[in-house]
Amino acid sequence: MEGKTYVDLMRKIELFSLLDEPALHTLAKSMKEVSIDPDEMLFEKGDIGDSMYVILDGHVRIHDQVYDFATLGKDQFFGEYALIDRQERSASATAVGATRLLRLLKSDFDEMVVAHPEIKDKIMSLLLSQLRLRNDWEEHLALKNKKIERQNQELSELNTKIEQQRDEIRAQRDLKNRFFSIISHDLRGPVSSFQGITSIINLYIKNQRYDDLLSMTEEIDHTVVHLSRLLDNLLQWASMEQSQIPYQPSHIDLFKMMEDLLGTFRASAKSKKVAIQHAVMPGETAWADFNTTTTIFRNLIHNALKFSNEGGVITIKSQIREGMRQLTVHDTGVGIKPEKAANLFDKTSQKSTFGTQGEKGVGLGLQLVHEFVRLNHGTIDVTSREGEGSAFTVGLPFEASPTGR
């Protein structure tokens, strides 16, 4: 295989694609035919490249010590850029069966381009064109990469925003559930006060105590008004679009707050024959959030009533001590066992306890009290003696702190 056939093979090689017919004939004359045996290695990875090869018959495997990259066959070529620059081979080449090749040595190629500078010029023109094309592609790819990076950044920011919104929605949902738990818990005490009223009404009718009956209906009306106001406040509180319990401190009128709270429990206390009174004076205030503070004392009064026996007494007193407004809810009820008092606000030990008349609970009250006292930057202390009663003292800021809290 010589002459025109070799020229046709040269024409397929991109490095020589700009050469004219005479130049290709010159190249073809410099090619030498070589034969190698099966599994014979043409060159090894790391060798310095010094030749280009064209396969006439047989196959050559391109590989390294681990992978086979390709198997080349008839009329295929490899190693052409070794003619331009002597670099280490990036892979090994081994014959697959008996193989016949054309080989062009770099030394022969160098002599040829010295003798025929037009070949060198055309090859250099081709290489420059390829370089410009490569640069164009690299610039195009760089722009594409920047666009992809920008899109990835936008997607990342969008994902972050979606995650934040999801977390906010989850937090709002959890808070709504929490609010409804608070609502149901706070309504449980006042509503349960109506359970014993029917029996009292029947007793008054049976004994013809009509004046007491009239007084009882007035008590019921008064309790219903306070209960309706409580429900409105709780629902308004729960309707706030926030992801955590709101803390909006202001100067709370403690006298009015206590009047409203005791009005809510009046029927319940009367049905249980428990005296309930407060010694908070008009004009006394504390710097705290109204809703959470009301919940604190609603729960403490409810618990005091729940664990009081018939004839018991509940008192609420107020004093200023150590720069704090202190309110103490004291009852003469069953008291708390010492081992339970030590862990009274531990979430893991919260369990519902039945009241003196079998009143049910959900174990949420004191947990809320402790959390809301902390929210209002206050303190809470408990003293109790089993069989004699308990006293819960809540300390609240008297004025706003320098930071506005």
Image (spheres, grey):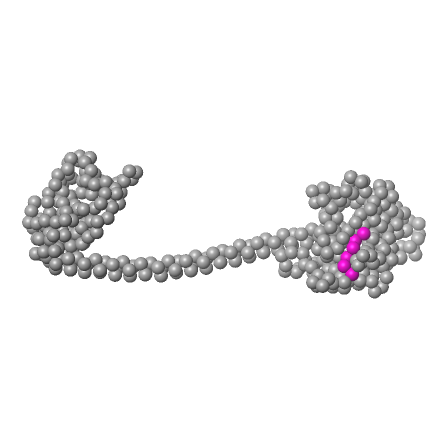
**Farthest residue toward the left?**
3
Q: Main secondary structure of the magenta part?
A: strand
* Image quadrant containing the N terminus: top left
Q: Is residue 76 above or below residue 218?
A: above
Q: Quadrant of residue 404?
A: bottom right
Q: Residue at x 80, y 47 (%)?
A: 382
Q: Is residue 161 left or right of residue 190?
A: left
Q: What stretch of residues is rendered in magenta?
A: 393-398
Residue 159 relative to residue 234: left or right: left
For image coordinates 65% across by 52% down, the residue present is 177
Left/right placement of residue 265 relative to residue 292 reads: right
Report if residue 75 is visible in the image.
Answer: no
- The residue lying at 20 percent from left, 38 percent from top is 41
- x, y percentage for residue 272? 86, 48
List x then y, in percent, for residue 206.
91, 49
The residue positioned 69% from the left and 63% from the top of the image is: 403
Q: Position of residue 107 (x, y in %)?
A: 14, 49
**Residue 395 is covered by the magenta coloring:** yes
Q: Nearer the viewer, residue 146 or 265?
A: 146
Residue 185 in the image: state x and y as whole percent: 73, 50
* Quarter in which the C terminus is drawn: bottom right
